[in-house]
Amino acid sequence: MIRFEHVTKRYADGTTAVDDLSFEVNEGELVTLVGPSGCGKTTTMKMVNRLIEPSEGRILLDGDDISGIDPVQLRRRIGYVIQQVGLFPHKTVLDNTATVPHLLGVKRAKARERAAELLDLVGLDPRTFGHRYPDQLSGGQRQRVGVARALAADPPVLLMDEPFGAVDPVVREHLQNEFLRLQQAVRKTVLFVTHDIEEAVRLGDRIAVYGQGRIEQFDTPSTVLGAPATEYVADFVGADRGLKRLSVTPIEESDLEQPPVVHLDDPLPAKLDAPWAVVLDGDNNLHGWISAEHARVHSGTVREHARRMEAWLPVGASLKQAFATMLQHDAGWIAVIDEHSEGRFLGVLTPARLHEALRRSTAADARDIPRAEVELETVTGA
Ligand SMILES: Nc1ncnc2c1ncn2[C@@H]1O[C@H](COP(=O)(O)OP(=O)(O)OP(=O)(O)O)[C@@H](O)[C@H]1O
């Protein structure tokens, strides 16, 4: 979708901001460009919409060399979101959002209708916010308007330059989560510049870690964290990269342990093969749990004695969420369910399994093979 071929940018004063850069962003993919200040991220991005022209090499958009596309035409295919949102101060939020489609010839009423939908999509109720002016919004709300406006012309490509850089960390995380949800719905091809490695790994399908004018590693967040290509990348992602990995590694079904299971209408079991059993209802959905000791000394049905289970997560949630849930509920294990089939119980995740999952995913990423096919022994060297 976006392809850089040996692109170099030298500024007039001799600064080489980008040096022989080649990489490709696939359709519908979100790639984050991350690196320290001055490493060439913004220069890279601005060459895509021809705000900056490369000195050497070429950039292709959907197979077309962009140097042959009229910049105005080109920018219609590319939404652009920057930190200083650049909203028109004298226009309402609704009109700010409707500006581009209106310029492109969409009738004003239709453009406003579309703008209202987009504001809704980015979490701003158009009835509350549509008629406000930019200075009547918080920083986070202004950023959302910026995103809505960039999406208004429905461009296939979005360029985002530190769009959430100016808001406090809590709002920032909120905006990031909203943006991820939005991206799942709209599936744009996104280049996202940030100097924050946390933001890069949270948002990126793949991340490009920049050194001076060059990409040091271009890979999935879990591979960059699990197997940094160079010392520089290892340093940049930080000594706590193991912790960061938790947040980008999902719980998979193959990670789960199968404990003893009883059903609500069963009589209390006199003996269990484990200190506890998971309790399911008639549809095999999670109900709760029961301890073996309790079952041994009482009588009646499971229903009368089962305890509710608070510590559960859907499959696909991150290992970090799993760890947090264990801590929050002071639980030695958590139940994992399939949200897509009305909460069917899939198994449990224990701390040992969590640890295995993390190690297995590092090894799989490093060797580019599916996680389920990696044996733990081959990782630990046992
Ligand atoms: N117009 C210019 N003329 C000369 N040098 C420039 C110009 N614009 C940028 N540079 C230099 O090019 C290098 C890359 O700048 P760029 O803005 O792409 O970095 P960046 O990674 O986006 O940094 P930041 O995170 O601070 O925005 C820097 O050394 C910068 O000083």
Image (tube, rainbow, N blue to C red):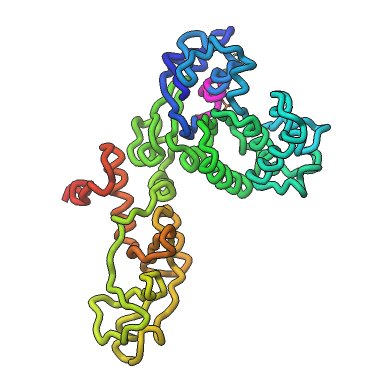
Q: Nearer the viewer, residue 38 or 317?
A: 317
Q: Quadrant of residue 306?
A: bottom left
Front-lying residue, 285 or 165? 285
Left or right of 291? Residue 173 is: right
Which image quarter has ligand 1? top right
Residue 362 place in picture, x, y as percent: 31, 44
Which residues, given as a range, are shown in magenta? 34-44
On screen, 234 above or below 267? above
Front-lying residue, 25 or 379: 25
Magenta span contains residue 336: no
Q: Is residue 15 above or below residue 350?
A: above
Q: Is residue 43 magenta?
A: yes
Left or right of 171? Residue 272 is: left
Q: How many marks?
A: 0
Residue 72, how many percent across, how many down? 64, 16
Residue 150 locus on image (x, y percent): 64, 32
Find the residue positioned furthest to the right.
90
Residue at figure coordinates x 44%, y 63% from the top left: 342
Quick check: can you spot residue 323?
Answer: no
Extreme-left residue of the structure: 382
Where is residue 198 drawn, in percent x and y? 50, 42
5 on left or right of 171: left
* 351 vs 154: above or below: below
Q: Is any part of residue 90 visible from this angle? A: yes
Q: Residue at x 81, y 42 (%)?
A: 131
- Residue 144 to residue 243: above or below: above
| Residue at the image position 43 percent from the left and 35 percent from the top | 206
The part of the image, by quadrant, that contains residue 106 is top right
